[in-house]
Image (cartoon, rainbow, N blue to C red):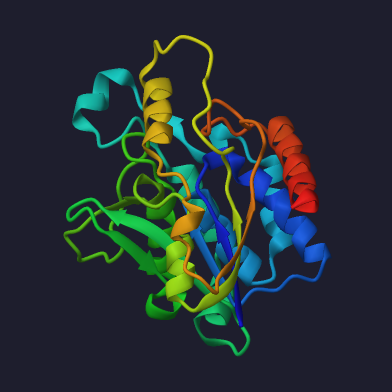
Amino acid sequence: MSRALVISGGGCKGAFAIGAIEYLLERFNEWEIIVGTSTGALIAPLVAGGKFDLAKEIYSNVKTEDLIKQYCWLTLPWRSSIYNDKGLRKIIDKNYDERLHHYLRGSFGAPDVEVCTVNLNSGKICYWSPKDLSREEFCNALSASSNQPGFMPPRKIYWNDDEYYVDGGVREIIPIERAIELGASEITAIVLEPSGVCAVEGEFDRIPRIMLRSLRLMTVEIREDDIPKGVNLKIIRPDEPLTNNSLRFDPIEMREMMKRGYEAAKKS
């Protein structure tokens, strides 16, 4: 029986996943398969590589300005995104190092890790494993998986490729099906949104706010009746929305999300 951990997308709400994983690890949970989308993709290799404490430190302290910076509005017609993501890429390169890549690439006992992206050219969902890529290429995949289109630029996986990739959450916010394809029969899925579509207050008078809300509304809900028989699925998710802005990385708010994730896992 293969056990899988699946982590959904959700930007700063990844802090909720950190809290949930902390509780699960305290109960000696181990997984043979870890699959993540977007912020979940950033967490997945760190958890698989035994670097949960590093993941917790990042999500406890990182700020929006450490990750992305807005371009001048006058230049946007000639750019591929509202923000540049150089800060995020620097954090990926620093923390997904060669030693971690070597471990996930072929060490005995290392979990299978895959991250989800969407091919912007073909529209297809694409999964990437460190076993099939160089360290730099897998860092490209991590960057692509976490880059929400429009907000951050699409990315190439291979330097000489003509195809571009974006946030896997565009089409697969919670990649449970992929975990099943990889052979998982017992799945813990951490979903960073409450069930159903929640109403939000406030005016939609800014492009980023409108885009974030629109992306959320396009997200496909998990249909538990679509899960094949013989697969045991446990879902950990918040009862109420965690934030109205998944790109606002505020350490105080995110530490509170961690507490909520820990408690949600405890109740599950």
Q: Is residue 70 visible?
A: no
Q: Residue furthest right?
A: 26
69 left or right of 28 in image = left
Residue positioned 75% across, 35% down in the render? 256
63 left or right of 150 in image = right
Residue positioned 74% across, 46% down in the render? 264
Residue positioned 60% across, 90% down in the render? 108
Residue 174 in picture, x, y percent from top left:
48, 53
Task: Name the quadrant of the N terminus.
Answer: bottom right
Residue 50 in picture, x, y percent from top left:
69, 71
Q: Residue furthest bottom?
A: 108
Residue positioned 67% across, 36% down in the render? 239
The total of numbered circles placed on residues is 0
Residue 220 in picture, x, y percent from top left:
40, 44
- Seen from the viewer's position, the closer of residues 231 and 216 is 231
Q: Is residue 103 positioned above or below 248 on the image?
A: below
Residue 204 in picture, x, y percent from top left:
41, 13
